[in-house]
Amino acid sequence: MKNTFRGGVHPEEKKKLSRDVPLRLFDPKGEMVFPLSQHIGKPAKAIVKKGDPVLVGQLIAEADGFVSANIHSSCSGTVKAVEMRRVLTGQMADCIVIDNDGQFTGKESWAARDDGGTLSNNDILQRIQDAGIVGLGGAGFPTHVKLKPKDPDAIRWVIANGAECEPYLTCNDQLMRSKGPEIVEALELVLRLFPNAEGVICIENNKPEAIKEMKKAVGDRARMKVKSMITKYPQGGERSLIEAIAGANYPASQLPADVGCIVCNVGTLYAIQRAVLYREPLFSQVFTLTGEAVSQPGNYIVRDGTSFAELVEAAGGLKNGTNAMVGGGLKTDAKAVKALVGGPMMGIAIGSLDVPIQKQNNGLTVLDFDPVEEAEGLMTSCLHCGRCSTVCPMGLTPQLMAEAAELNNLERYEKKLYGLECIQCGSCSFCCPAKRPLTQTFKKAKGEIMAKRQREGGNK
Amino acid sequence: MNIILVTTLVIAAIGIIVGAGLVATGKKFAVKVDEREVAVRSQLPGNNCGACGYAGCDALAAAIAKGDAPVNACPVGGNPVAKEIGRVMGINAEETERKVAFVACKGSCEVTKNQGNYIGIRDCRAAVMSGISVTDCSYGCLGFGSCVEVCPQEAIVVKDGVAIVNRNRCISCGLCVKTCPRGLISLVPVSKVVQVQCSNHDKGPAVKKICSAGCIGCTLCVKQCEFGAMTFGNNLAKVDSEKCTLCGKCAAKCPAKVITSGTGPV
C-alpha cells in the first residue's frame, strides 16, 4: 500500500465554510422534476402518466435494460406532466414533473428492519437494484451492475470512498461523522458478496473527526479497516484510490473489478444500508451547499428533483442580494457569480439554478468570482514547462495532448497520447502557469472521439 | 583478349538469365488493375473530403468500378462528374440536383437575447458541453464557427453570431452537417429555396420571449400552402421539399419571417 498516487495537486480546501454544519433534511415546496436519465446507461421508462397520484418512494420510472436504474418519487402529490424540461447540462430532457403536496406521505414507513443475516447474496443485489441505487460519487453508474462482476471471488478489495478530495464539499465528511455504524453495516453487506475481499474505508487525513468516528464504528471487525490517506487532489478519484490501495493501474477500457477492486462512495453505501435492511428506495442523498456567495453554507439531505434555486433560497439566498438567476454565470445586481454543480475542480457550471437536483449530485458551489474569466484574461501560449505532466494522476502529457486536440489530430490524441485515459480531474488546468484551458480541451476531444465511434459503429 | 571476351559473355549471360527471371515473375505476380478504376479516379475531383462515405477518392473509384457504389456517389462533383463516370462504366447516370448546406437558424445577435456569459474555448462543440448557455435559445446557432473551421471551401461565415452559407462555394461535402453539435445544418437541393429557418421546438410564447426570428407555431404557413407541402409538428413548421412548388406564399405570410423564399438571404 502506497497510501497515495503519483501526481496530484493541492488546491485550497475551503472546507471550513460548511464542514461543521450537521446534516439537515430539506423539504421542498414547489414542483419536483425527475429527469429520466440520472445515471450512466439507458434512460428509465416512465410508468406514471399525467394525473396519477404518487407517494414518497413510489416507483415512477422503471429501468430499461440491465445498465439502467429505477427512479422513485421523493415527494407525494400528483403527476403534473411527463415532458421536456431543462436539466443541469443546459439541454432539454424527458422528465416527470410532480406537483408536490408538501405532505411527504410515505408509501411505507421503512422503519421495520430486516435481519440482514438471513438474506442471500441474490436478495441483497435484488434489493439494491430495486432501490435504483447509482454511484453517488458523481458518475451515476448503476450500483447493482458494479456489484455483479464476472468473478466475485477475484475481488480483493472493497474500497469505501470517503476521501472527498474535491475542495469545498463536506457532505460525505458529515455523513461519516453521523452515520458511521450504518456505513460499516453496508460495507459488511457488500463484503458478503465478495468472500475474498477486504474492506478499506479511505478518508483523507484532513477529516480527523470522520476518521475517529469510522474507526469507532469499525471496532475490531476482522475484514475491515479505516485508512487515513494523504490529503491530495484527486485522491478520491476511483483510479487514484485503486493505485493507492491495491497498487494497480489499469486502462480506461477496463473496470475496477478487472484489477480486483470495487469502489463505492460512502453515500452509496449508506443508501445500500437503507435499501437492503429497510427496503427504502433511493430518493434522497447528502448534499453540500457552499461557496463564498452563499449566505449560509451547509450540509443537507436533499430529495431528488428539488430545484437548486429553491434550496439556495431556503438557505438564505445568495450574499449579494438578489436571486435573479438569468442565463449563465448568474448576473445579480451586485456582481456576476458562478454556480457549479459539484466542487470547483470537476463541477459543471450551470447557467440557471432552476434545474432539478439529480441522484448523483453532491454539491452546489456558488462563487463570488469567476475563476475562468480571470484565467482567460491571463492566458498565454504554452510555456512547455511540463508542470501538467508532473501533476497528471494518470501519467499523461497534457501539453502534447492539448496540442494534438487543438490541431484536431484526434488520431494522435487517442492512439499516441492515450488521451481517452484522461479522467478530467482538472489538475493540469489548475497548475498551468499559462492558464491554458486544458481540461476543457480534453473534454471536447474525448466527446468528439466518442461521437465518431458511435457514428462509425452505427454505419457497420 | 581472352579474359575480356569471357567476362563479356558471362555478364551477358547473367543479364539474359536475370532478365528472363524478371519477365517471368512480372507475369506471374502481375496485379490486375481495373482500367475502369483508373478512368473513374481520373474523373473524380480529388479533394479526398470523404463526403461520399468512402475513405477518399481512390476508395470511391474502386467501389464504383466494382459496382458497389452508384456512379453519382460523389456529391462534390455533381452531375458533370456523374455523367463522365457513367460514360466510363457504360451506365446512364441519373440526373441529381446539386445540394447545398442550409443552416436552420436565423438567430443573429440582433434578434436573440443572450443572458449567458459562457467563458471558455471558443468552439461550439466545447460550448454545448458546459451547462452555461451561449444563447438563450437551446436549439439555435452558437456562432463560434465549428462549421467554418471544418469547411474545406471557406463557404461558411459567421456573421452577427449566426452561420451563413455561401451557396455558390458550397460543394455539399457535408462536413459541417456532421460537426454542428446542435444539428442545425442539413443538405438541401439548391433550387429548393423555401425552407424553415428555425429549429426551436419550444412553444410559441417561449420562443417569442427569447428570439424575434423564431417559429412561433402559428401554423399560418400550413393554412396558406395549397400543395400540402407545409406540415407542423413538435412546435415547428416543416417544408416537404418534394411537394413544394416554391410559390412563396408561406414565406409572405409568416409573421416571424422565418421561412426563406428565393429573395431572402440564405
Image (cartoon, coloured by chain):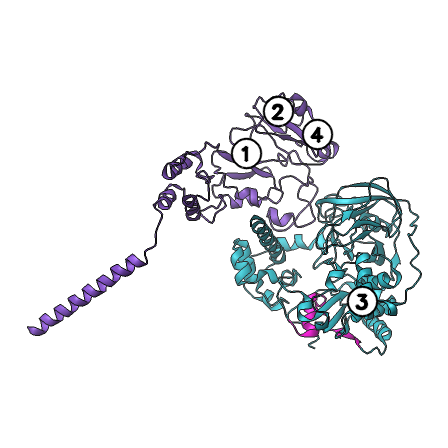
Chain colours: A cyan, B purple
Where is mark 3, residue-wise? A121
Mark 4 residue type:
Gly
Chain label for disc 4 = B
Q: CA distance from mark 2 to mark 1?
A: 17 Å
Disc on res. B188:
1
Q: Is residue B61 left or right of residue B23?
A: right
- Of pointers 2 and 4, the one earlier in the residue sequence: 4
Q: Are marks 2 and 3 on the same chain?
A: no
Could you tell me how far apart the alpha carbons at marks 2 and 4 are, in whole angstroms? 14 Å
Mark pair 3, 4: CA separation: 55 Å
Q: Marks 1 and 4: which is nearer the front?
A: 1
Q: CA distance from mark 1 to mark 4?
A: 23 Å
**Cβ–Cβ below 8 Å for labels 3 and 4?**
no
Q: Are marks 1 and 4 on the same chain?
A: yes
Number of other residues with Cα within 10 Å of mark 3, as a class: few under 14, some 14 to 19, many 20 or more = few
Check chain identity for marks 2 and 4: say if they share one: yes
Are circles 2 and 3 on residues that touch, CB within 8 Å? no
Label 1 sits on a secondary structure element that is strand
**Circle 4 is placed at which residue position?**
B217
Q: Residues within 10 Å of mark 2 (few under 14, many from 20)?
A: many
Q: Is residue A226 above or below residue A269?
A: below
Residue A452 position, x and y percent, is 57, 51
> Where is residue A21 shown, x and y percent of the image?
86, 62
Q: Nearer the viewer, residue A359 or B208?
A: A359
Residue linked to disc 2: B251
* Badge 1 vs badge 4, beta-carbon distance below 8 Å: no
What chain letter is assigned to the residue under label 2?
Answer: B
